[in-house]
Image (tube, grey):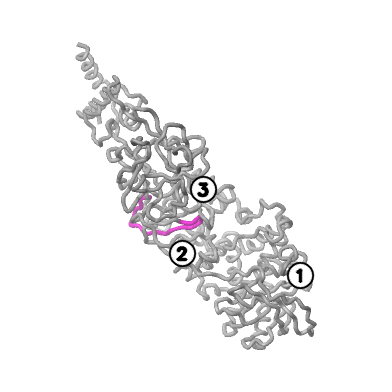
Amino acid sequence: MKRAISILLVMILLLAIPHAAAGETTQSHIIEADRVLIYNPLPYDAKGNTLFSGTLTKPQEDAEPNGDSGFMPGLHKTGKDYSIDRKTPDTQDFWVCTDLITYRYDKCTFRLAAEGAHCRIWTMENDDLAFSEEQTAAMLEAFETTIAPTESAYFGDFRDLSGDGKLEIVTYAMNSLSVCGFFDTYDLYTKEEITVIDPDDAESYNYLPIINVNSRMANRMNVVFGTLAHEFQHLILRSAVLASPANADRLGSEITPGLWLNEGFSMAAEELCYPGSVAEQGYVDAYAGSDKVRLGMSYQDFDATASDVGAYGQSFLFTEYLRTQCGDGVFREILAYWRSAESVSALSEAQAIRAELTGEQIDALDASVSYDDAAAAKLGSEDEILLSKLALAFRLAILFKGSEGLYAIGASDPDMPAYAGTGRKIEGGGALLTECNGSFTVPADADSGLVFVGIKDGAVSEIYSVPEPEEGFYVIAANYNGEWLAIEAKPSVDRYLETVPVEPNADGTIDAANANGAIFRAVRTENGFRFECRSTSGTHVLGRTSGTSQTMRIAEGNDTFAWTHFADGADRLQADGFYGRAVLFGSLQRGFGYFAPAYFENTSFAKPRLFRVTIMRGDANLDGKLTAADAALILRTVVGLSYMNEPMCAAGDADRDGEITAADAAKILRLVIQLDF
């Protein structure tokens, strides 16, 4: 009789439960666009801060192209000839780099070839490739009438160690055809300063502002003029660095603007002195054809071993953008900011550039894109966030070439090269441009913090920032040899992690029916996430084995993990309270999970991903179907004859009241017989 009464009560409930939807799904974000700019807003770090664009066509990543090396003079290697030679007024000894491969410096005798109000030009004795008298005269005229007055106006004054306001230009045949000239920063120190920095070779410096010019360029005088303009800016910028009160106690390790900005300023100096010269020399075309740019090179990436010539073009375009946005005085003002900075904390490109933006420009940048909280936290200060947004606007200015506003760059420059590959790790401050046909689905495995900018009909259609994972049900998976493998969210016999195959949906979710017990609940805590699952024996979390073992496991406890992007570009689960990094990776031999970051350099596995689980309302047994079996499972659980883990409870809670009761079974039966929709 009690059984009959129970059934009768259920039938009554079938008619009493209010209407609700049968299922819920989570769709990936879709952007209506013809082109999409994928931008990493994080600051550039040569060792990291890369974010994965998401799998655009297939899971592999393209090979990284090799860049061109560059010449970076440093401390001297000398022959130790410190004798003082008496010379006539028309000759003088200078320490110059006689070997650009080993950076060897030797003392050589030079003859005064020309002199003006702002410079002296010296020719090395016995140089068979020396500039002719006519070429030297042309060089003197170029510096006196164009370069010196232009750069003094646009950049400021240099550190005048000689006291007569004149620059020394030394010309000699260098053992390289690829180096047109250079400025050695150590020539701008006083003898007392060098004695502290390099006491062993303190006598082998010039203590004069000097530009070195390769006389092998004598048949390309336009290149010589550009080199003088370029290197003179480097000398002025370094003078500003050494003048800064904030650098007074940092002798030999001064804080200086990044090389990307320094080189950009020097390219701008060439253009200001000789309009059109940068394009004529091919730097802008090099940007448009650069594989490094195409593959997401940061605008701040100027590492000599990682950049190609396109980096010069990119830095030049950025400074052109700055001049268009802030006016012709922007370079001088930024260097003046550096000269006057009183504290080390003030010495940053972000703060210096922010000082040149108007309130209206800052408001427009802030309104253009809103970064995820986690990305904003990694950027740090408001100045860095603003610079990041400015760099995004700079990319869009290249694409739009507007006549005014944030997307104006001031010149008709080539388009950003488009990327047509499979997916990339994008450097901080870097971007990919990809073509699409009307719409673009943000990849499910795109790293949080990435910014996707839709471009349609020559305008921005949408700016979308990938959010950090939210609390909820996920499958933790990685692509191993073309197959997606996931951690099985239940203890194995020995409680070590097992792997199961799992296939994500096209919309970036995973159906509960296909998750095969790999569903974790991500619970946000003060220190990160707890990834936990529930079974009949209690709640289990991702943990590590005891002692010194590095293997991860399903364990009972309260382990908290921070889902973090680390410097090598890997996603890591960092365990709270454990010294080390918990790394998940696909290994068919042992499953997921070793506390060994070095293993992450192995190319046989991919980074772990969080895939949100799609749970159908009412599908209590997670078989992907809504049947009476789901109602039966709920009723058996209510009376203690069966067990439902947390994903099952989330699906079985058909009336969304937070509890599993007979009312949920009644709701499911109504859905099955289509009394509810």
Mark seen at residue 292: 2
Identify the residue shown where x is 30% and y is 26%.
643
In this rendered view, identify the residue nearer to me: 596 or 560.
Answer: 596
Cα distance in 3D space between marks 1 and 2 = 40 Å
Amino acid type, callout 3: Ala
Residue 34 at x, y = what percent? 37, 57
Q: Which residue is mark 1?
A: 161
Residue 151 covered by magenta stretch:
no
**Circle 3 or circle 2, nearest the eye:** 2
Tell me the quarter of the picture where residue 668 sits: top left
User: Tags 1 and 2 in contact by the CB under 8 Å rule?
Assistant: no
Judge by depth and name the residue closer to the eye, 92 or 140.
Answer: 92
Q: Is residue 377 above or below residue 291?
A: above
Q: Is residue 627 above or below residue 360?
A: above
Is disc 1 placed on a helix, strand or loop?
A: loop
Q: Residues within 10 Å of mark 3 (few under 14, many from 20)?
A: few
Dot 3 and dot 2 residues touching (CB under 8 Å): no
Magenta residues span 426-442
Amino acid at the residue labelled 1: Leu
